[in-house]
């Protein structure tokens, strides 16, 4: 009986410790529609949301949908480019590379990015409330 209990506790302890994953220090950055042009270096501004066909929460959809936005890049208060981005699974790597060009070195390890707020069933989003959130590993 003692051997069975000891074996059970040993297996339980091994399983429990095996589940502890290395935690990453993920920080986030918001790209909003406010222009902060007094800043030195690159500054990203959400210029417009062209379309948002993402499947609303609470609805079952065949297609997940996508969001299309225009991000303006400023360097030392001067417009460098306006870039149209499509947020979908197939464009994920392309979008990561584009963001990495303009983010500071400490923010280049991009983990995730998305357009917020996410649509809800029956609700309409005010265009002024949209922003892009980028999660990066510090």
Image: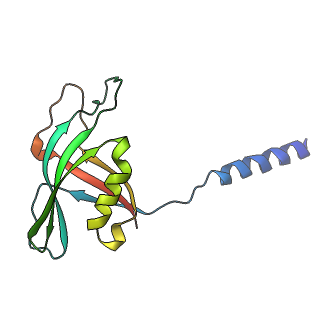
Q: Residue at x 36, y 48 (%)?
A: 92
Q: Residue at x 31, y 24 (%)?
A: 59
Q: Where is residue 33 shown, x and y percent of the image?
A: 12, 54
Quadrant of residue 103 in the image?
bottom left
Q: Is residue 33 left or right of residue 90?
A: left
Front-lying residue, 112 or 42: 42
Q: Where is residue 7 shown, x and y percent of the image?
A: 84, 46
Q: Quick check: 60 above or below 2?
A: above
Front-lying residue, 8 or 78: 78
Q: Is residue 108 left or right of residue 53?
A: right
Quadrant of the drawing holding the N terminus: top right
Q: Is residue 107 left or right of residue 49?
A: right
Q: Quick check: 62 above or below 7?
A: above
Q: Residue at x 9, y 71 (%)?
A: 77
Q: Where is residue 118 shown, x and y percent of the image?
A: 26, 39
Q: Quick check: 108 above or below 67?
A: below
């Amino acid at each position: 009986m003692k051997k069975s209990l000891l074996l059970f506790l040993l297996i339980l302890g091994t399983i429990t410790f095996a589940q502890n994953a290395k935690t990453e220090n993920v920080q986030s950055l918001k790209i909003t529609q406010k222009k902060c042009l007094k800043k030195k270096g690159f500054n990203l501004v959400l210029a417009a949301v062209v379309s948002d066909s993402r499947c609303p929460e609470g609805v079952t959809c065949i297609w997940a949908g996508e969001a299309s936005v225009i991000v303006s890049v400023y360097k030392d208060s001067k417009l460098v480019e306006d870039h149209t981005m499509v947020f979908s699974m197939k464009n994920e790597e392309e979008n990561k590379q584009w963001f990495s060009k303009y983010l500071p070195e400490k923010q280049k390890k991009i983990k995730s990015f998305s357009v917020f707020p996410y649509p809800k069933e029956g609700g309409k989003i005010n265009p002024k409330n949209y922003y892009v959130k980028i999660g990066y590993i510090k």
